[in-house]
């Protein structure tokens, strides 16, 4: 059984229910013979991927949804073999170069040039170019991005890129300059309610307006998350009412617990307790950034208003450290310690600037 | 994947394509993104780089070229210029055999660069066709007796590869000229840079950029509203490629494509008048400019207020900004402008604020989380203003 998220994913631009202006723009672009390279960015769960798939259908018709998954091997200059997965249809392919980490340049150089130098086989096709969708483009190494530059210009007759990223900060200026930037905002609460209503109707579930509203409020404008919550509520309850509790994702509940621990007791022993829990999160592959962020936002309502900017200050500081450093746990723990000291000195009325 | 890389099918397609070449060729330019369609084809078409171009034109007449280093920000005409120069020197017949372009999409480790350059340099110098045709050809194209090796995007070459290049450059200097192209001249090692004549490409100035955009809009039959060209130039920050891409996307919004595809003579007058204007709003939306109102609401939230409310009011606005997907760097740019020219903020405070911006910018480039960073910045700046 597929998840709700996948089951009711819109397939055509016409089925998209929010950001109508954006849909219109994509439609216009897809109709034009000179579709540009795109850089699509926006927060996760905003519906970037769905929109791209719809745009591909507008470009090529339904055959573009017939996806094959292949594995190919690439060899780095130091003779390392890389196995790389490619999803493709006759008209496009989709890759996530971040899968091979720092070796992504090889993929960009070899695979993309190969595609770029290949003319379309199908003369009846609506467009002569193929589209390459690059997921998680913000994780492309500088080298890989540099390798894209001329390829995007030289072979623009044969290939168009659609780069997908959560943010454009790590995309180098020359690449940004070669793409049309398309921002996909997260759906508003109202948009979310609309989608929930529609999906519920398709599933034949009894509607509860109050529940939909609450999910919209709690999902942080993340549609994927909203749908997961929605599904969980209906799966776990016989009858759903406006007040049926929404189970938070396991790890969020866990972080809430950590936040409570930190505020309850500030001591070396407690640090050890918290450390165990942090390790648990990391072992379960919750990204450290997510942990720090979630923890910070859950600490906020628990601490004095004067301390709130401080909590954010150190969360931002150590999150940056996580990105630059090599041992995530160091920085998570440093953040915890810092917050404990902040609370402690605030309670004792000492204003230590550290 | 199967037929994606299927050689046979590709060959068949190629030969099928060849038979209908005539029609395809004509199609081709309308299929290209405008940046390629309007890439300068000769030196004289390169705008706004007058000094560089006039020096190059003079050198070309002398038919002796130094090694060259082109540097400057993206979309200012570096690649276009060297390609145009090479075309004018050698003409279509010799271009392929006399010019080698290596860019960042090619493997450029030390060994490979040496190998490729060596192979290329060693090939016998191709000559224009013999007989009267050749004389004619030489009149149009000087065809000087050396080859050109273009190392585009040279700043992405490793230091080692660059050092290795020194020797190679000297070894073949009789029969080859190098042209290095890069964004950051400081990333080119000194010994290499000092062997080259340097040419700086400036960000396009307002006048030239807008003229070029107007020309393109004219050729494409796009009606551009008051101030829209200015907005294009401003949003693209001297990067003409970006400006052209924006213009093309804006055009797609205002002119129904079917009509654009029909071609001018078929378009009746009603349609032409029916096509909308490209407006400032459309341009700003495409360029990802954050609406002034949105920035204003953040700045308002940051104004000094009791500690109790300060956090919440700022956090709410930031949360929305992030959920709306605005890019943090764009936000920083626009806020910086606003804050710096805000007369209600004292100079001494601005000084502290500038330091906050500097730190945040650095962290963002390092890949730090945008939400935390923007919130942190807003809180800190708010405190500076208190
Ligand atoms: N000075 C210019 N005159 C005319 N057109 C220009 C000029 N600069 C840029 N363009 C336009 O922008 C496009 C890109 O220019 P070009 O490839 O030369 O940039 P570049 O300087 O090599 O940039 P990058 O550093 O990103 O490689 C060209 O195809 C052309 O349409
Ligand atoms: Mg270039």
Image (spheres, grey):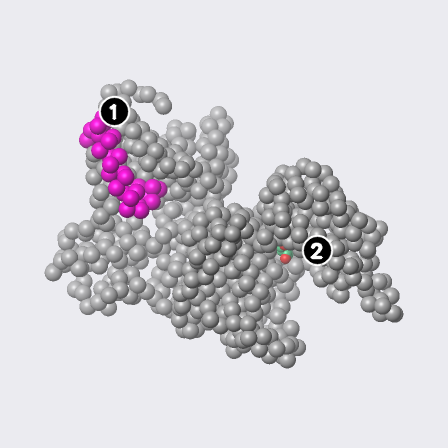
List the residue tagged with mark 1.
A344
User: Same chain, marks 1 and 2?
Assistant: no
> Quadrant location of residue A318?
top left
> Which disc, if any, is residue B307?
none
Vertical position of residue B336 compared to residue B257: above or below: above
Vertical position of residue B297 compared to residue A302: above or below: below
User: In this rendering, would A178 be left or right of B188?
Assistant: left
Q: Secondary structure at mark 1?
A: helix
List the residue tagged with mark 2.
B119
- Residue A271 lies within the magenta run: yes
- In the rendered image, the residue lying farthest to the front is A79
Which contiguous range is marked in magenta?
A: A262-291
Q: Chain of mark 2?
A: B
Q: Nearer the viewer, mark 1 or mark 2?
A: 2
- Answer whether labels 1 and 2 touch (C-beta < 8 Å): no
Q: Chain of mark 1?
A: A
> Quadrant location of residue A33?
bottom right
Residue at screen point 52% across, 78% down: A124
**Relative depth, front residue between B176 and B285:** B176
Residue at screen point 48% across, 30% down: B355
Vertical position of residue A124 compared to residue A30: above or below: below
**Relative depth, front residue between B61 and A208:** B61
Magenta-drawn stretch, dominant element (helix, strand or loop): helix
User: In this rendering, would B141 be left or right of B158?
Assistant: right
Residue at screen point 71% across, 60% down: B41
Cα separation between marks 1 and 2: 71 Å
């Amino acid at each position: 059984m597929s998840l709700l998220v996948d089951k009711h994913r819109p397939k055509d631009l016409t089925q998209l229910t929010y950001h109508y202006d954006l849909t219109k723009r994509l439609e216009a672009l897809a109709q034009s013979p000179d579709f540009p390279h795109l850089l699509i960015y926006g927060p996760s769960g905003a519906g970037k991927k769905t929109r791209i798939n719809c745009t591909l259908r507008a470009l090529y018709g339904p055959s573009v949804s017939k996806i094959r998954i292949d594995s190919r091997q690439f060899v780095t200059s130091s003779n390392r073999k890389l196995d790389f997965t490619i999803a493709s249809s006759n008209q496009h392919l989709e890759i996530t170069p971040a899968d091979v980490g720092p070796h992504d340049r090889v993929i960009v150089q070899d695979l993309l040039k190969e595609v770029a130098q290949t003319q379309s086989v199908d003369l009846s096709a609506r467009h002569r170019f193929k589209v390459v969708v690059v997921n998680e483009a913000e994780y492309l190494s500088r080298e890989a991005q540099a390798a894209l530059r001329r390829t995007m210009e030289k072979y623009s007759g044969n290939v168009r890129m659609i780069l997908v990223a959560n943010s454009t900060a790590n995309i180098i200026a020359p690449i940004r300059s070669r793409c049309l930037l398309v921002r996909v905002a997260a759906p508003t609460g109202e948009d979310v309610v609309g989608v929930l209503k529609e999906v519920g109707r398709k599933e034949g579930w009894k509607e509860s307006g109050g529940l939909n509203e609450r999910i919209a409020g709690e999902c942080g404008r993340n549609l994927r998350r909203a749908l997961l919550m929605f599904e969980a509520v209906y799966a776990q309850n016989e009858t759903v009412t406006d007040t049926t509790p929404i189970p938070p994702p396991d790890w969020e509940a866990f972080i809430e617990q950590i936040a409570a621990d930190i505020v309850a007791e500030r001591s070396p022993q407690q640090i050890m307790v918290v450390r165990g829990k942090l390790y648990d999160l990391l072992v379960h592959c919750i990204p450290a950034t997510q942990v720090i962020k979630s923890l910070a936002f859950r600490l906020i309502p628990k601490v004095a208003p004067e301390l709130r900017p401080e909590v954010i200050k150190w969360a931002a500081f150590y999150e940056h450290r996580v990105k630059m450093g090599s041992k995530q746990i160091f920085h998570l723990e440093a953040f915890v310690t810092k917050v404990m000291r902040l609370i402690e000195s605030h309670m004792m009325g000492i204003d230590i600037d550290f | 994947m199967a037929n994606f890389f299927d050689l046979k099918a590709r060959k068949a397609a190629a030969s099928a394509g060849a038979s209908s070449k005539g029609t395809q060729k004509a199609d081709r330019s309308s299929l290209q993104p405008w940046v390629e369609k309007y890439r300068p084809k000769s030196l004289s078409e390169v705008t706004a780089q007058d000094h560089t171009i006039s020096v190059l034109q003079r050198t070309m007449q002398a038919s002796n070229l130094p090694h060259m280093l082109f540097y400057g920000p993206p979309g200012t005409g570096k690649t276009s210029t060297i390609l145009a120069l090479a075309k004018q020197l050698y003409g279509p017949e010799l271009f392929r055999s006399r010019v080698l372009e290596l860019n960042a999409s090619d493997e450029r480790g030390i060994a490979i660069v040496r190998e490729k350059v060596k192979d290329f340099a060693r090939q016998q110098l191709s000559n224009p066709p013999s007989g009267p045709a050749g004389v004619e050809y030489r009149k149009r194209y000087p065809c000087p007796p050396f080859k050109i090796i273009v190392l585009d995007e040279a700043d992405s070459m490793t230091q080692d590869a660059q050092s290795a290049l020194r020797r190679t450059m000297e070894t073949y200097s009789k029969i080859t000229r190098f042209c290095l192209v890069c964004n950051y001249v400081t990333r080119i090692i000194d010994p290499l840079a000092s062997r080259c004549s340097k040419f700086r490409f400036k960000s396009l100035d307002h006048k030239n950029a807008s003229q070029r955009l107007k020309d393109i809009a004219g050729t494409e039959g796009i009606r551009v509203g008051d101030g829209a060209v200015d907005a294009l130039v401003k949003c693209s920050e001297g990067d003409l490629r970006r400006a052209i891409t924006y213009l093309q996307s804006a055009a797609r919004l205002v002119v129904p494509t079917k009509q654009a595809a029909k071609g001018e003579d078929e378009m009746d007058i009603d349609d032409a008048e029916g096509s909308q204007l490209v407006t400032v709003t459309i341009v700003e939306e495409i360029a990802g400019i954050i609406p002034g109102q949105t920035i204003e609401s953040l700045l308002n939230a940051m104004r000094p207020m009791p500690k109790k409310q300060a956090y919440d009011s700022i956090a709410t606005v930031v949360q929305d900004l992030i959920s709306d997907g605005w890019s943090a760097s764009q936000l920083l740019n626009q806020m910086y402008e606003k804050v710096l020219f805000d007369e209600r903020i004292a100079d001494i405070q601005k000084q502290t604020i500038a330091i906050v911006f500097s730190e945040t910018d650095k962290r963002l480039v390092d890949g730090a989380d945008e939400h935390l960073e923007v919130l942190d910045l807003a809180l800190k700046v708010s405190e500076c203003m208190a």
